[in-house]
Amino acid sequence: MKIIHRLFIVLVACVSAAFAHAEDTVLVPSLIPYDKSDTASEDVRKDCDWNATMPRYLAKESDGRVKIIDQGIEAMPDKKLMLVATALHTVGGGGWSGPKWLVLEGKLTEGDKLLGSFEARRQTIRGSMRGCGTLTSLSEDIADDILEWLKTPSLNAKLGNAK
């Protein structure tokens, strides 16, 4: 009888943890848009996929806290993180080609309620010899900053080099 009681307690704990985990899940779009047409050059838009790989990196590194949604995220009432690229600069050439940066703004909402917002910036003087590789690296650094921020979201936070 004690074994059945203990198994029941373990089952209830597992189910409770699963429900709590589902409530903490944050949805992100599968592609991060650019704020304006001049936020990135046509070559960057065509050749670089950092804005598609970053959401996948966020989901992979989040231990299940972030889930990617391909379409219709705007209409969903769930907890979601909407990201937009507001500024970036990249060129190939590593440290010989000057500074490179990536700036994102994010808003964490649930339904119509704003739960948090941030500006995230990462920059480097080095970078890779390929401009797209530098953007991917900067976006992964920003993703790590975002995952840390999601533990205790706040309004108007400054992440990474934006501090």
Image: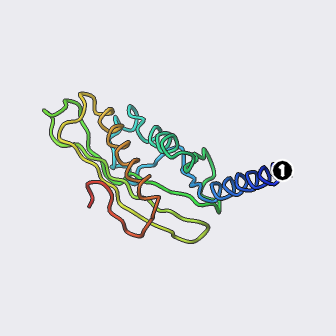
Would residue 2 appear left or right of 111 to someone viewing this image? right
Tell me residue 47's x, y (percent).
Answer: 38, 31
Total marks in image: 1
45 and 104: which is toward the camera: 104
- Give the SS element for disc 1: helix
Instruction: Provide residue 46's location: percent of width, then percent of height.
Output: 40, 34
In the image: residue 152, left or right of residue 26 = left
Residue 75 spot, x, y in % from top left? 64, 59
Residue, x 26% and y 46% (percent of image)?
A: 101
What residue occupies the far front of the structure in this picture? 2
Q: Residue furthest left?
A: 96
- Residue 74, quarter of picture: bottom right
Answer left or right for 4 relative to 89. right
Which quadrant of the figure has residue 96? top left
Q: Position of residue 107 (x, y in %)?
A: 47, 62
Find disc 1 in the rendering and name its residue: 4
Nearer to us in this view, 10 or 42:
10
How dense is the environment of label 1, judged by Cα within 10 Å: few (below 14), some, or many (20 and up)? few
Q: Nearer the viewer, residue 87 or 38?
A: 87
Q: Mark 1 belongs to which amino acid?
A: Ile
